[in-house]
Image (spheres, rainbow, N blue to C red):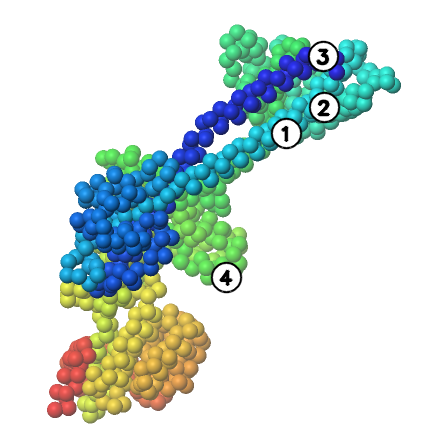
Amino acid sequence: MRNPTMLTVLLLPPMLGVAIMALFAWLVLYPNLLAEVLEHERQMFAQSGGDTASEIADRFAHHDGPEMDAIDRAALRSRADLVVLVDADGKTIFANDVILEGGNLGAIAMVPASLRRAVADRTCGRGVVVAEADRLLAGCWTINADNRLLGGPEALAGHLLLVQRIDWAMSQARAELLNDSLRLAGGLLALLGLLVFLTVRLIVAPVSRLAGRLQQLGDNDEPVRLPRTGIRELRDFARVLNQTLMALRGRERELQAILNTAVDGVVTIDTDGTILQANQAAATLFGYSVNAMLGQSISMLMTDIDAGRHAGYINTYMDTGHARVIGRGREVVARRADGTTFLAFMSVGRLDLPTGLHFTALIRDVTAERQAKIEMHRLAHRDPDLDLLNRRSWERELTGMLAAAGEGTGFWVLLAYVRNLDDLAVTFGPQIETAIMGAVHRRVHSMLTGCELTARLARRQLAYAILSPQGEAPPYLMAALSASFRDGVDLGGLSTLPDVHFVVVPQAHRFPDHEALILAQDAGGSWAAQTADQRASTIFVYDDHVGRAIRERTAVAGDLPGAMAAGQLYPVFQPQIRLGDGSVRGVETLVRWRRPDGKPGPGPALFIPVAERIGLVGDIDRLVTRSTLHHLSAGRLNLPRNAVISINASVKELADPVWLDGLLEIVRNAGVPAGQLEIEVTETAVMENLDRTAGVLAHLRASGVKVAIDDFGAGYASLSYLKHLPADLIKIDQGFIRDLTDSRRSRHIVAAVINLAHDLEMEVVAEGVENANTAAILTEIGCDIGQGWHFGRPMEADALSSFMKERAG
């Protein structure tokens, strides 16, 4: 080591600084540490006093005047050095030292004067703790005046006093702090010594020797060479330095290779626009070789317009520092060697080097990306198959049309939907859907004048917004649309017959906003689909009446689950009378809705179809079945012993594989014979899936449950199907019964059905018997059972019981 003075200068200030900081920390922390110890002792003492006061109060509260000798003095002694109970006059009535009992509080020297004053002034409250320096802690706590001591007549209104000496704890704390300080000082001294040794050995001495050796190095690239007598540390340093230089040169080659293989083009120019460097990606991007680009003007890569402006860009940046490209990215039009152009994203960075100011540009061809974005935008806003607006864009454009509409500039909306698209796809394959919808669109669009918007809202639904001064569809157009697809459409030699229905929303411009219009549009489409089989025309016109009906159904759908949970749905019963002898054959169970205020709710003609759509009809049928069988098993209906209970089943229930098991379980749980239960299914429900329904009905009959075909003649009216149906009874639709007295044709039809049913060993029920003449005619032509208001209206259980008693009497 050549310069010990430098070592002294380097090491002495840190060592003195560490020593001074340690001493200062000791002076600052020592009082705080002692204060923390004292505060900890005070908190523990206060906690102990409060617990002791609570225990004594609890002992006195739950024992009527226990004797003081029962108090464990040894246990109290563990709480404090002195435990005293004084009464309201300051007299000692108990102490863990029996010598102090019976005296006055003022005679106990160990109790601080401040605590005596607190007792005398009755300010102990929930606890007063005082400390005399670091010698002792004392506190007092009030004992509840409702507690009695010694079994005496007077209630105690006194105090608990505790005194604890803590001088030994403070002495121990001082000793521990002193020992910790000595150990810390020793550790610091050892650490400082090690620091001095390591600094001298590993830093100061080698650096001092290395400083002289490095003065011999020149500015060339030759490796650092040392004499054989050079110290080991310097030789190691030279070896590391040579390895570092070689690594840097290798890294430079690697960076160049990475630059040449980069996907983006990299071009470096000077302030004159001369290309100083370019990688292989840039050469490929522009159609040049790297050597052909070096030394040329950057304008060769620009369009003529940008090339003429480039020098001005550079000069403006040099003068003002403002640039549109430098330090940020933007899209530009670039030119290749063959003269073609492409869209490129270019970002330019400033590069300050000793040789001057340079600019480096990263260039990427984004033509494909831009085309992809355009395609994504198209897919997000247009139907990919027909290239029409999709639903999102349709709603946005309708908003604009509503805003632009004014007096004499109205419009109306037309929806076209293909009802049988699924059937056509199953028959000809799913690939035909696009062709059919395209053909339907072209034909409909060709018939419209002033069509402003076209869209495909759903897989089988198209929409059109047509300008019209009054917002009304021309009558001739309605007729033309109705007949437009009667001959089908030709799909390149394949003739198909799409079942196209239309929904017209007139005066669409009068809706307050696009949300109301969309709601009406969707509601009209839904309503048209539900009522398509009941309408003769394929065109449905949305109006206020339809809107009210839709709102009513929507309200019912919202209220129905709560009504079921609240028990507002209940069964009613309509008698079925044997026409031959007037006896009661049984009852048909129906369902009604009663509001909480006792008023009737929506009728079954309204809420049953709603329940079918929202999936609650099965729950309603199970609710009615349980309630009916419960009434029957409890004898509340007063029916004959073999009376039949007829319950309706829906189409969805017949398609549910677990419905049958659930029904039979309800019957078993009610304890009702299966032969008393009759399940009614409509003719339409049966014919929708004859094979499956026949299997379910056969299983029902095998279980003992009777089966009835309801509304017979209202749907398919095919008598030949009766021989395939496992049924016990058919119910002739009331449409044939109501005009029985006036129509001989209806009478012949009903008679034919009755004779055929009897030949198939089925009974016949006539629904809708409203008068005695109808009942007489039915009896005459051999009908077995009658049901209708002539015999009795639907009634609740109590009313049915009274009805049966009257007939029996």
Distance between the alpha carbons at the discs numbered 4 and 1: 91 Å
Judging depth in this view, the residue of 402 and 27 nearest the camera is 27
Q: Secondary structure at mark 4?
A: helix
Image quadrant where residue 229 sits = top right
Q: Secondary structure at mark 1?
A: helix
Judging depth in this view, the residue of 396 and 296 nearest the camera is 296
Which residue shows up at 59% across the image and 14% down it? 307
Q: Tell me the kind of residue under disc 2.
A: Leu
Distance between the alpha carbons at the discs numbered 2 and 3: 15 Å
What residue does disc 2 label?
A: 202
What residue does disc 4 label?
A: 426
Judging depth in this view, the residue of 326 and 474 nearest the camera is 326
Report the mark closest to the observer, 2 or 3.
3
Residue 304 position, x and y percent, is 58, 15
Q: Tell me the kind of residue under disc 3.
A: Asn
The disc at residue 3 is 3
Distance between the alpha carbons at the discs numbered 4 and 3: 100 Å
Q: Tell me the kind of residue under disc 1.
A: Ala
Q: Are marks 4 and 3 in contact (CB under 8 Å)?
A: no
Mark closer to the chain start, 4 or 1 = 1
What residue does disc 1 label?
A: 190
Which residue shows up at 25% across the image and 41% down it? 115
Tell me the quarter of the image containing the C terminus. bottom left
In the rendered view, does 734 fall on the left or right side of 617?
A: left
Distance between the alpha carbons at the discs numbered 3 and 1: 25 Å
- Disc 4 crowd rating (10 Å Cα; few below 14, some 14-19, many 20+) is few
Q: Is residue 636 above or below residue 168?
A: below
Q: Secondary structure at mark 2?
A: helix
Residue 157 position, x and y percent, is 18, 52
